[in-house]
Amino acid sequence: MSRSLLPTLFMALAFACEIQAQSVAEARASMRAGEYEEAVTSFTRLLREDESSVDARRGLVQALRITGRYAEAEATASRAPNQVMLANTLGEVLVLQGSLDAAETAFHRAINGGADDRLTAAANLAELLFDRGNVDEAMERFDAFVDVYNDSDGRLDAPDLVAVGRAVSFLGRKDPDLFRDALRAFDEAARVEPGWTEPARRAGDLFLAKYTSPEAQAEYAKVLALNPNDPEALLGMARAKDFDGTAGARAYLEQILAVNPEHVGAHVLQARLHLSSERHEEAREEAEQALATNPKSLDALAALAAAHFVAGDTTAFRLTRERALALNPRSASLDQTVAEVAVQVRRYAESADRALAAVTLDSAAWTAWSLLGMNELRLGRIEEGREHLERAFSGDPYNPWVVNNLELLDSFELFEVVRTPHFELFLHGTESDLLTPLISEIAEEAYDSLARRYGTEPPLPIRVEVYPSHDDFSVRTLGETGLGALGVAFGSVVIMDSPAARQRGHYNWASTLWHELAHSFHLGMTDHKVPRWFSEGLAVHEQRKARAGWGHQPSIAFLEALRDGRLKTVSELNDGFMRPEYPQQVIFSYYQASLVFEVIERDHGFDAIRRMLDGYRRGATTPELFESVLGLELADFDDDFDGWLRSRFAAPLRGLAPLAEAPPAQAGPEVLEDFVRSHPGDLVARIRLGGMLVNAGRFDEARPHLDAALRMFPDYGGPDSPLWLLSRVHRANGDLELAGAALARLNSLSESNYTALLEQADVMAATGDTTAAAAALARTVHVYPYEIEDHRRMAEYSTRTGDFSAAVRSRSAVVALDPVDMAQALYMLAVAYRDAQNVTAARRAVIRALDVAPNFDDALELLLQLREGIGTGGQE
């Protein structure tokens, strides 16, 4: 070769290399933008041009891996002329297919061969060893990364920094402070290579693992802004939505599976979502699909085991667990997953058992320790729960549920325990005197009623914890604040808000207690296997059986949802509770489910409901029970029930038909009157106009509109009910009988309208019906028992009607509320005891009055009468 040609040849080669590098960069840019098919095409072309290109081959393998073409990715990596440089990339593909021995060999080849991605291979190898149960060796390898970072003098590239962050995050299981160091490594990697999204995604995973979903979602959003098709960031978003309990996870999973139908993580999370909705068959199918791709995925095996657990297939559960432990004898992940799912399906004792199995396998399974402690608290095993939560906190101080529960447990010294024949009441010391007689009376009544109705009883005693702070109730239930519920039953442990925890007029504690005690029976009868929709609907049904107006009632918003087709079918009602699609769907599902039992009891008798509960205990499914007990296919019941609903509410549905655009909220009465003349069948317009006229004092004009609205929707007991407005019309016109009737009917449709109950008591008293007045006031106590004047009036009315036991309860409540004139309150309590023929209690009360006011003449005289037995007729 002529020497004169060499410079030209070298220039050509350099130019070709430059073109190759530029093309690889373009292909990589396509992949990082989520244009995977374009990336595959570009990398394939580049490999045809230069089979030895490591960057092009790595890029092609990665693009094929991301899109789920694992076999093709494996083959492409295996054909590499330089096996060392592709070994780590090959190992990553092999792991996803469950070829773990081959993957381990590949990672060793990359490390020992000095590949430029050997630190990533080292992190991959350590994680693989950890997942296979070689924990000690894995932790040693992770620990070596600390020295790598400290000796680097800031010269590590972004992939190496990500490898350091991954390693240090594993070290955090022994030293929680190291999680911050892992996050710093990811942040540093992002600064070194701004266009690469893996550092942000890894940071998001770490935030989510440490319970900070908003920060996690912010990191995932950074990734998706650059690559909206990144499967791992989409999975992170889906997991974050599931963590938050909000809608949206399924949409992200659909995006992932559109990119990669074989994505194991997406199928596993799909399975978990199905399990949370108690759809164990669908969960099993998703888990098995994941295992078809990777038969050694511990996450997929955990999901499959959980599906078998929920289905009650103990043999399949045991075999699946053995299969997972054969892969990793020290893995707690399967038992921990089943413990988490068990909580979602309200099987708290079994959750505690599985959490205990998890920590037995791995003493550093801090989430499992927290699950064990929290479930022991739910089972009423307070001291054991505290001990295990403290163990969880020692290893994971970031867990907010553990921190919150431990803080709450410190406040337990402020509570008192009161025992009744069937209950252990746990009440705050500041309201124990007031609430003990009220709660014990309702609790024992509910117990007797439900025990007769179901012919059984739950494990005793039932522990009822009542919290004057809603945040404390929420923490006791979920481990965090923000729970919208009023009460929760864990079986024979019931947690609920005190009436002090809620705004007056928004909470009926007695109705809530009845509801939760119904759950105690349902859970006990079925070994906690009853579906949520069934138990919730039946509990509301029991509330309405107990008292008129108790439980969820029909509303205009509910009927609008029925009109618009936004209610779940009966076969899908569990999703209405577990995965609501809009904010009010849970409330609508409560009422809708309760109507299911109204229909079943009417058409098939209550025994059919008992038989269905027993069927759930035996492991039967809802479709099986509808067919075997009711003789109906569930799909047919869906259709029949929808028809019944529309027939039952036909009149108000006609009044809610969209006839024309309603006048705006600021419209005056003249505009509304014109609209109503044109649309006389519009329910909402009639109520709006009637209310506006009542507020303007135009009572006679308001009445025809309110009467028309009442004819359309006679069961409406909401705050703007025509009945409430009509009571104001009647009272303004001096017709107390009609006003009282309207208020009585309104309060039979609403459990917590405190103002309407007081109004009814006033009207009944004005008519001379003190018995009805006392009954209305008694219902106010179920809503808000802290008004001394209500109890005083009740005592007076009860005394007039000869109900001296009720008078004693009311006078006792006055004393418990610490009135300004305590001596007078105690004296009146003594009088009530005397009238009730309880001389001993009367004497104690009057002596207490004299302790407060020694010269109280009336009290001295009463004490003398009691000692002489004058006018008591009672016995010592």
Image (tube, helix red, strand yellow):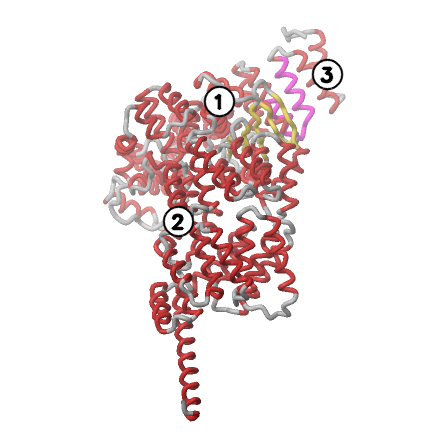
In the drawing, what numbered circle is on residue 293?
2
Residue type (three-letter) at the residue carrying disc 1: Ala
Q: Which quadrant holds residue 28?
A: bottom left
Q: Which mark is residue 775?
A: 1
x, y percentage for residue 814?
62, 26
**Of residues 759 and 598, the one drawn nearer to the viewer in this rendering:** 598
Q: Quadrant of the C terminus?
A: top right
Tell me the magenta residue range. 810-834
Q: Nearer the viewer, mark 1 or mark 3?
A: 1
Is residue 791 left or right of 716 when viewed as pictured? right
Mark 3 and mark 2 lie on one chain; the one further toward the N terminus is 2
Per the picture, the main secondary structure of the magenta-coloured stretch is helix
Category of crowding for the residue at label 2, using alpha-carbon neighbours closer than 10 angstroms: few (below 14), some (14–19), many (at least 20): some
Alpha carbon separation for disc pair 1 and 3: 33 Å
The residue at 59%/46% (across/down) is 399
Rendering coords of residue 457 (x, y %): 50, 19
Residue found at the far left of this picture: 678
Question: Which sits earlier in the primary sequence, circle 2 or circle 1?
Answer: 2
